[in-house]
Image (cartoon, rainbow, N blue to C red):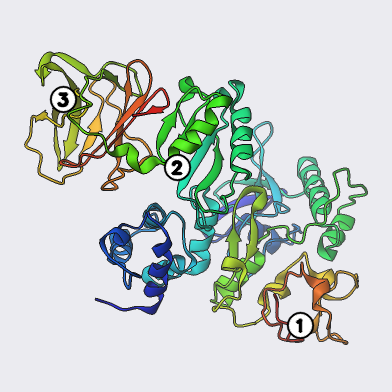
Amino acid sequence: MNSNSSVTDLCSTCNYFATCVYRQEREGPIQFCEMFVEVVEKHKEGYGGLIAILEEIQSKYGYLPQAALRTVAEKTGRSLVDIYGVATFYRLFSLEPRGKHLVSVCKGTACHVRGGPTIAEEFETQLGIGAGQTTSDRKFTLTTVNCLGACALGPVVVVDGHYYSNVKKSEVKGIISRSDVEEERYVIPADEQTFPLEVSCPRCNHSLMDKEHLLDNAPAIRVTISFDGHHGWLRLSSLYGSYNIESEYKLPHDRIVNFFCPHCHAELVGGSKCPECSAAMVPMIVRGGGIIQICSRRGCRGHMLDLNGVNV
Amino acid sequence: MVTLTINGVEVTVEDGTTVLEAARFLGFPIPTLCHMEGLSPYGACRLCVVEIGQEPKSRLVTSCTYRAEEGLIVRTASSQVMKARMMILELLLASCPQSKVIQDLASKFQVRQQRFRQEHEDCILCGLCVRMCEEQMMAKAIGFRGRGEKRSIGTPFDIRSEQCRLCGGCMYVCPACQLRCTYAEPDKAICGGCANIHPPCYIKEQFDDMMCYMDPCVACEIIKK
């Protein structure tokens, strides 16, 4: 294990953040973060790798610590000026520590005409901060975004990857308090909450239900998957709480696969990461309003279900 | 070798020569601000615009970045070029009126009015200092940061860069801060120690917005906060 001084500096910073994966595994201050060096090694080649490196660091730490940028410069052999320039250019990157919960209020055209600015103002009043700021207790960071691509659901608010659609001014307080107790949200006893869901593609809105094939005595969800050069179908149980699947190819455990809509062939991919294993989440629209997101890793049970802004 | 026509004069230049170099070889003056021999062309100030092609398909390009092509027809002082150049100078004057370089250029090109909202920017983002630092001084201590209206030049994290050797190259090439550096406007002047001017400045607080990236300053040893 390499004990580089700048890497040690970096890892003491993430000690304050629940987002660091290593924090959950170890006690006390972390001496060295293997993840960090791995990330840099992985994307080292080519100039475009820089953004990928910064993205991964930000997804782990919640922001880009100064020591991290210095280490990236050292490891990739690029100048700090270049890396700092890229990090300040993109709005995605933040050089300031962000709160535990990231609240993004959409101010795009469609959300704007449906009252997006009022919602943003209400969040500002409720949290007592302006857009782009973090509350003093480091719980919430409020940002406004220009479009989330879910214009039909506007005004849209995204809190930690959960979409709240048709948000009303009176609902803002509830969204904040619910996000604050977010941890318990994922713990759903499976036997108590099994109900079938009807889902459709978030791009073409075509139903993904396969009425001809039953899984758990309910129509299965049919999608196309691709991994390791294989392309084939995958049927998922539509029963919420059941993890039964059928697949054309045998899926190796822990493999992350790409999901596609069988109708419009668009990749089913959202911006959010699995709360359990940090793989990309696969979003699907639930009939009746809402979004379900499932983890793209085989064997991982991470999922998020938002029904009309009500978190189950 | 390529042959092109500049203002009706045919000239044969080597491959890879820019239009600016070819025109200057023939002795046609083209004003520049962000161009400097020894630094890579950047095309930021747009002052070196020339008209290429023939009417009605002619267009304006920056001669410092445009490579000479076979049969290219260039006009360096057509009415379209002069109009564009005057407008660019007017805009530069609006953003950075205290620069002597810009004032001189504006006066040379008969710019007699400035119709835009007056600003007093410290920097016109010409990138000369950034290129100087990187290409001639091999330091890469300063660079561009942010984007849009928040774009600025400076060191990463606004703290002293370890790469900076206090050479002063960035101040030497800057077209925007010369006036301040040479005490012509005492309120805004910085020490000017780099130009061996006496007396050295001793009241650091007055110079919060100084564009000196040196920390501490070589001449007066003021430590930037």
- Quarter-wise, where is residue A180 in the image? top left
Camera-side residue: B138 or A174?
A174
> Does the rendering let one see residue B115?
yes
**Element type at mark 1:** helix
Measuring 60% from the left and 46% from the top, which residue is drawn there?
B72
Measuring 83% from the left and 72% from the top, which residue is drawn there?
B206
Q: Which residue is mark 1?
A: B194
Q: How far apart, in angstroms, are the residues tagged by discs 1 and 2?
A: 56 Å
Q: Position of residue B126 (x, y in %)?
A: 68, 59
Q: Which residue type carries mark 3? A: Ser
**Position above or below: A112 against B153:** above
Dot 2: chain letter: A
Q: Position of residue A146 (x, y in %)?
A: 55, 34
Q: How far apart, in angstroms, are the residues tagged by discs 3 and 2?
A: 31 Å
Question: Tag on residue A180?
Answer: 2
Q: Which residue is mark 3?
A: A237
Q: How far apart, in angstroms, are the residues tagged by discs 1 and 3?
A: 74 Å
Q: Which residue type carries mark 2? A: Asp
Q: Which quarter shows the N terminus of chain A?
A: bottom left
Left/right placement of residue B190 relative to residue B22 reads right
Q: Which residue type carries mark 1? A: Cys
Label 1, residues with CA under 10 Å away: few <14, some 14-19, many ≥20 = some
